[in-house]
Amino acid sequence: MIASPLRTLVRDAEHDADVAEVAAEALERDAVEVVVGWPLSLDGSEGPAALRALAYADKIRRSVPGVSVRLVDERLSTVDAHRALHAAGKKEKQFRAIVDQAAAVVLLQAALDAERAGHTPGRVVEGPRTGRKPRHRGAGRGQ
């Protein structure tokens, strides 16, 4: 599998329209997992941005029951996206419009590659225990 972008959503913190769009897309595509960028600090700790990402991922989890939501370390994904865009011949001025989308592709591809190599990338966002078996292989931090 190769990651590819669909579109960039604008964050709607007031009404969560973006969460609803992610949920609709996941259901329409019969997704088994949604990957959310986890902006850890360079030392690997969770700062305020990482905690906001966790809360966002939890909103998605609650809006798509039965679909796993995984936080994946996004450190340096923007740097990698800039390199890839530069290598593709894009000019710096063109980066702004597509760098977030390119970084999301880098993040998702890294998660797919890690899974293919037998690693469990990131951390599954868990809700309250319901007694149901999860649809994913497991939780935990991957390397």
Image: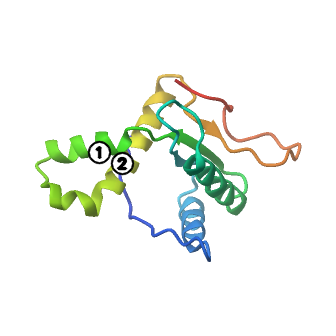
- Looking at the image, how many numbered discs can be counted on the residues? 2
The CA span between labels 2 and 1 is 5 Å
What is the x, y in percent for residue 78?
Answer: 34, 45
Residue beneath label 1, please?
81
Neighbours of disc 1 within 10 Å: few (<14), some (14-19), many (20+): many
Front position in the image: 46 or 104: 46
Residue beneath label 2, please?
103
Neighbours of disc 2 within 10 Å: few (<14), some (14-19), many (20+): many
Residue 11's label in the rendered image is none
In the displayed structure image, the side of residue 9 where residue 2 appears, left or right:
left
Residue displayed at 78% across by 48% down: 127
Asked if the residues shown at circle 2 and circle 1 are in contact, with their CB atoms under 8 angstroms apart, the answer is yes
Hey, what amino acid is under mark 2?
Answer: Ala
SS of the residue at dot 2? Answer: helix
Say above or below: 11 vs 30. Answer: below
In the displayed structure image, the side of residue 141 where residue 112 appears, left or right:
left
Sequence-wise first label, 2 or 1: 1
Hey, what amino acid is under mark 1?
Answer: Ala
Residue displayed at 54% across by 49% down: 36
In the displayed structure image, the side of residue 78 where residue 64 appears, left or right:
right
Say above or below: 126 vs 10. Answer: above
Residue displayed at 72% across by 57% down: 65
